[in-house]
Image (spheres, helix red, strand yellow):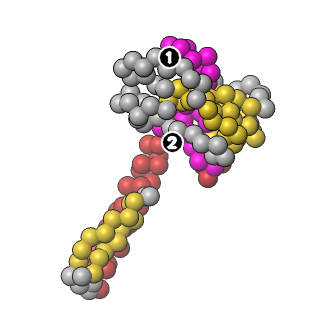
Amino acid sequence: MRRLLISAGISLIAFPCAAASLEELKAGQQFQAQLNFVRASIAVASDKEIKRRLASAELVVYGRVSRVWDPGEHNGGENDPDWRLALIQVGEILKGDSFKSVLVAFPGSGDIRWYRSPRFTAGQEGIWILRHAFELQTPDYTALDPLDYQPTSELERIKKLCRMNL
């Protein structure tokens, strides 16, 4: 049995198909073109959302995580974030005050309140869109929204969006 493979972002979808005639291949190409259009529309929406996150951010940095640790402060209650700390060596400041390094608190818990929050590991490089979350009783910067961390491949895009938000 043959399979028709369709790329959908980071996912690859395989559909079983009995034959791959020229007409079916053309239909697959048309579908791929429509999928590319949808992807482009999603990217524009993501730009809007990232611009919103950048506008409310206190600090935006490009850097590398040098260390991650558990500060050992757990209340054990419902929705406990089980805070972890990441020390980021700053390579470039995109917004905010100048720092050589910055401490970022992030939840280690997989609780329903925190499951979408990004997690960080030593050696990880990227862009952090940071803000304080004093209401969460952490004095450190936080990156709690999935958009608050962007991979290194997005550096030029984030720089451009930061300039647009000035």
Please state which of residues 133 and 106 is positioned toward the viewer in this rendering: 106
Q: Amino acid at mark 1?
A: Leu
According to the image, label 1 marks what residue? 136
Stretch in magenta: 128-152
Tell me the number on the disc at residue 78.
Answer: none
In this rendering, position of residue 4 left or right of residue 49: left
Q: Does residue 13 appear anywhere in the picture? A: yes
Give the residue at x 39% y 18%: 77
Quadrant containing the C terminus in the rendered view: top right
User: Does label 1 or label 2 sit earlier along the sequence?
Assistant: 2
| Residue 72 in the image, given as x and y percentages of width and height | 56, 23
| Residue 105 in the image, given as x and y percentages of width and height | 58, 27
Please state which of residues 110 and 144 is positioned toward the viewer in this rendering: 110
Please state which of residues 26 and 15 is positioned toward the viewer in this rendering: 15
Circle 1 residues within 10 Å: few <14, some 14–19, many ≥20: few
Circle 2 residues within 10 Å: few <14, some 14–19, many ≥20: some
Foreground disc of the pair 1, 2: 1
In this rendering, position of residue 97 left or right of residue 129: right
Give the residue at x 63% y 46%: 124
In this rendering, position of residue 117 left or right of residue 164: left
Give the residue at x 39% y 22%: 79
| Residue 117 in the image, given as x and y percentages of width and height | 47, 34
| Residue 8 in the image, given as x and y percentages of width and height | 39, 60
- For label 2, the SS is helix
Q: Does residue 126 appear anywhere in the picture? A: no
Q: Is residue 35 above or below residue 30?
A: above
Give the residue at x 78% y 32%: 100
Tell me the number on the disc at residue 47.
Answer: 2
Q: Is residue 86 one of those drawn in magenta?
A: no
Q: Quadrant of residue 165?
A: top right
Quadrant containing the N terminus in the rendered view: bottom left
